[in-house]
Amino acid sequence: MKGNEAIAEAAVQAGCRFYAGYPITPQNEIPEYMSWRMPEVNGVFVQAESELAAINMVYGASAAGVRAMTSSSSPGISLKQETISYLAGAELPAVIVNIQRGGPGLGNISGSQADYFQAVKGGGHGDYKLLVYAPYNLQEMWNLTMLAFDKADEYRNPVMILGDGVIGQMVEPFYPKPYVRPELPVKDWVLDGCKNREPRVIKSLYMGEGELEMRNNILQKKYKVMKDKEVSFEGYYTEDSEIIIVAFGIAARIALSSVKRLRSEGFKVGLFRPITLFPFPEKELFMLARESRRFITIEMNAGQMVEDVRLSINGISEVLFYGRPGGTIITPAEVQEKILQLFNHQPYLA
Amino acid sequence: MARPLSLKEISKKEVLISSGHRMCAGCGAPTVIKMVLLASDYPIIAATATGCLEVSTCISDYTAWKIPWIHSAFENAAATISGVETMYRSLKKQGVISKEIKFVAFGGDGGTYDIGLQSLSGAVERGHDMLYICYDNQAYMNTGIQRSSATPRGADTTTMPAGSVVPGKTEPRKNLTRIMAAHDLPYAAQASPSHWMDLMKKVRKAFDIKGPKFMNILSPCNRGWRSRTDEAIMLSRLAVETCHWPLYEVEYGVTKITFKPKEKKPIVDFLKPQGRFKHLFKPENEWMIKKLQEDIDREWERLQKEASLSAP
């Protein structure tokens, strides 16, 4: 099973019964899988005529109370941004999968991490946040997809799975743990016919004096709760490390190989891997900041998450960056070389 | 009106799309593009929507196009060429350019029937002097054979796979040429590379008409149609002879069928050589073939009626 198929099957098992998609490489396995899998569970698969149509179908299905998902890759996710903002504004749960490819523009079709800003800083218009998960192997593709549906419902907020072409296409063993539905708030906002009850309204338009500010304050309060409760990360050998690599997704996986290798050679290096990109593990990184310690952010882009790492570290430690943009895959050897430069007190050249 | 080109003249013209592009062996699209470019007496500027043609003609630093060529995104070849054409008109008015240049946009069926329909309709309504060419291979071939609204009923695709319950695509294909003709644009036509004289004549006619023009050209894809690499022209011919793909044009509201098969072949002749229709020949799916035949008969009847209404 490919990473993309793991996401699709996890979604089905988590109760996703509506999927709308549109072809774009390297995520085509998701719509293709859903096209035959959804009918088996009495779910709906729709191939839309564009990404815009697909995300708006999700908006409609979600308002009707169904667990709904769409997926695409970078250029297609750009097209979806308007409605992602609407989903956030109308507080509609949805799961959006971005199997990132190289950009900008048409770019290429190899794995990339250049949509970090788009995913965590907004992407669409207005003050809104998505809950953003960054899986780094197939096990997490599976687990986080299931979690994404729960969190979307819990917060009435769109959740993004920020994967990439590498893990999307990768095949590896994992344990497909069965879905266990947690206790979730009743969907008392769903538009399912108002016979014998008060009509409900789902919208993102607030034109009255002060109305929109109030709505925004409510949203911000929700994002604050997410920041307090939903931060997820993993640390590897961070306690005694002189150098800590910060990386997410596929870059973290590559960096972990380098860390293990360097550790076996006696170098005190560790890895800090954010699993949620929003909320970002700011406090946790700050706790690791020391004057004697250096951080290096490794990303498959020209330097995006490094800004959040610097904000978190707040000047206490030096924060360096190494990355390769344009869908170029970093090798463990490259990372090792960079780290060794730092240990050997050679001038750092990014 | 442009006089027809002789084969001798065509053979002496420079082919403006070079060999060495990365389209698959046996693909119909490069043949179609070659014919379109050869048909022109004017210099051409082309825009291409994202798709097989775009990806495989601009690999790395190379381009297969010997003409000015622009690509922007998937959904907006018509909008992109609108921008280029408008600027050209402005510069011409200002006296900066005097040359007569023709503007062409190429899009596949995904980029034309589906995601690009809005920008195409907009460009036609604004009246840009351009020719939009849809090379229709009847599915999203570039991303791996997903259904499009140009996919015929019954075809097996990766997002509408033929199985024990669903016999391939259940919906009929969208009649885009009619939709475009309904814009009341000066010229809309349907063509096929099997009838190359007809195709090139239509292109030449289109270039001599001011305003927006649209041509829908069938372009067999052996990967998606599951056919042999040497069957593109044969299959496009069968599409015409079975009236799956009638050759006609609508010029200022006047419909003219440009090729009437002497004997209309049954649709089975078109379906048989293609793997994507293989499952239709199982006894339980025979109704689907019947349905396909009915669709074709109805549309052919209608088209003939439409043509007879505008007959002189």
Image (spheres, rainbow, N blue to C red):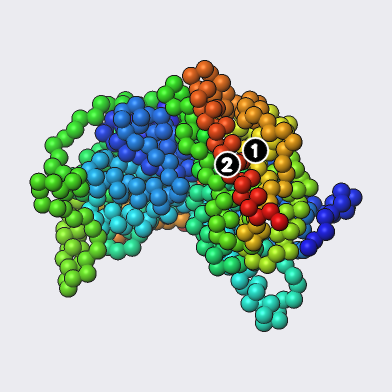
Q: Can residue A305 be seen at all in this image of the molecule?
A: no
Residue B245 lies, in percent from the top left, at 64, 41
Q: Which mark is residue B243?
A: 1
Give the residue displayed 54% in from the left and 27% down from the top: B290
Q: Secondary structure at mark 2?
A: helix
Q: Is residue A57 above or below residue B284?
A: below
Residue A278 lies, in percent from the top left, at 28, 51
Instruction: Return the disc, 1 or 2, that comes first in the chain's sequence.
Output: 1
Q: Is residue B285 above or below residue B47?
A: above
Q: Which quadrant of the view contains residue A120?
A: bottom left
Q: Residue furthest right?
A: B8
Q: Is residue A35 above or below residue B106?
A: above
Q: Is residue B278 left or right of residue A118?
A: right
Q: Which residue is mark 2?
A: B299
Q: Secondary structure at mark 1?
A: loop
How packed mark 2 is, by other alpha carbons closer than 10 Å (few <14, some 14-19, many 20 or more), is some
Q: Which chain letter goes with mark 1?
A: B
Q: Which quadrant of the view contains residue B310?
A: bottom right
Q: Are marks 1 and 2 on the same chain?
A: yes
Q: Can residue B245 be seen at all in this image of the molecule?
A: yes
Q: Amino acid at mark 1?
A: Cys
Give the residue displayed 61% in from the left and 41% down from the top: B300
Mark 1–mark 2 CB contact (< 8 Å): yes
Give the residue displayed 61% in from the left and 32% down from the top: B225
Q: Amino acid at mark 2?
A: Glu
Q: Which quadrant of the view contains residue A262?
A: top left
Real-space Cα separation, disc 1 to disc 2, in angstroms: 9 Å
Residue A335 lies, in percent from the top left, at 45, 44
Q: Is residue A287 left or right of residue B176?
A: left
